[in-house]
Each structure stands twice: as structure tokens, then as C-alpha cells.
Amino acid sequence: MEVILKQDVKKVGEKDDIVNVKPGFGRNYLIPQGYAILATDSAKKVLAENIKQAQFKQDKIKKDADAMAAKLEGVKLSIGAKAGESGKIFGAVNTIQIADALKKEGFEVDRRRITFETDVKFVGDYIANLNLHKEVKVQVPFTVVAE
């Protein structure tokens, strides 16, 4: 029995795969649970069209991420934080502050796509890693200064 998976199923396949399964497994488990649909000719045509449209969307998103990465190459941020005499920051610099600084520079980046290599707890120079797309990653240097 041929079915089209609507989501990833362990040891069977991934989303949008056309797989052969035993009829009982397909009829009694995959289809009723909503994990799969029958692989009829019309369903295969719909799947092919959906994959084509999804690929087009992914290409556009990647192109936008590449353009933003090119613009971000020369950017250096400065983050102000309250610090003690030894240079230790009260608290830490987090991704929200980096996202706000990027927004002031004219770049809209989701804070969940920003990571640090080390914890930012002292005054100094650091690097923020921006994951704009699964294939496009940018490193943006920033300096933490005492206010």
C-alpha cells in the first residue's frame, strides 16, 4: 500500500515521502492518526505542486538571508551596560539587547536566531552568531562598554 506521509514517522519516513507500507499498518494506524494519506494519482500531483511551491518559498527566504548577510558584514555594535570597577557587568548582555541594537542599525533579526560563543558578563569585545537561514550564518562583532 502506497501512502504519502503528512509528517515525520519514525522508522517509516519523513514528511512528504511516498512510502510502501503494509496495508494493515496504513489503514489501521497511519491514516486514522492523520500521519498519512493514500497515494492516489491526484494526491501525488498535489504533493508535487506543494513541494514545488515550498522550494520556491525556501529559495526566496535564502536569497533574502544572503542579502541581509552581505549588508551585515561591516556592522560593529556597541552595547552599553552597567558595570563595576573590575569590568564585571551587573547581569549579562543577552540576545534581546543585540536584537535591539541591530534594529537601531536598520536590521530586523529575531532574537531567537542570535547566539553567543561565550557568556557576556564582562566589558570587552565579543562575537554574536546570527543564524539567518539554515545555510546562512553571520558573525557580528560587538563591544560591551560600561555606562
Image: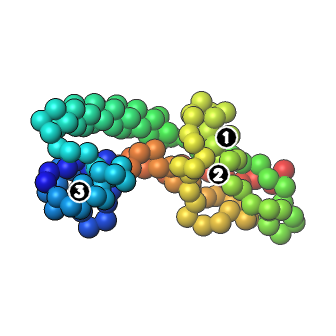
Q: Position of residue 132 (x, y in %)?
A: 46, 44
Q: Residue at x 63, y 43 (%)?
A: 99
Q: Nearer the viewer, mark 3 or mark 2?
A: 3
Q: CA distance from mark 3 to mark 1?
A: 52 Å
The secondary structure type at the circle numbered 1 is helix
Is 135 left or right of 13, judged from the image as shown? right
Q: Earlier in the sequence, mark 2 or mark 1?
A: 2
Crowd around label 3: few <14 · some 14–19 · many ≥20 (10 Å): many
Q: Residue at x 70, y 47 (%)?
A: 97
Q: Nearer the viewer, mark 2 or mark 1?
A: 2
Q: Residue at x 83, y 69 (%)?
A: 86
Q: Nearer the viewer, mark 3 or mark 1?
A: 3
Q: Residue at x 62, y 39 (%)?
A: 102
Discs 3, 2 touching: Cβ within 8 Å: no
Is 30 left or right of 125, judged from the image as shown? left
Is 134 left or right of 139, judged from the image as shown? left
Q: Earlier in the sequence, mark 3 or mark 1?
A: 3
Q: Which residue is mark 2?
A: 95
Q: Position of residue 116 (x, y in %)?
A: 58, 60
Q: CA distance from mark 3 to mark 2?
A: 45 Å
Q: Position of residue 12 (x, y in %)?
A: 24, 62
Q: Is residue 108 above or below residue 79?
A: above
Q: Which residue is mark 3?
A: 26
Amino acid type, label 3: Gly
The secondary structure type at the circle numbered 2 is helix
Q: Which residue is mark 1?
A: 101
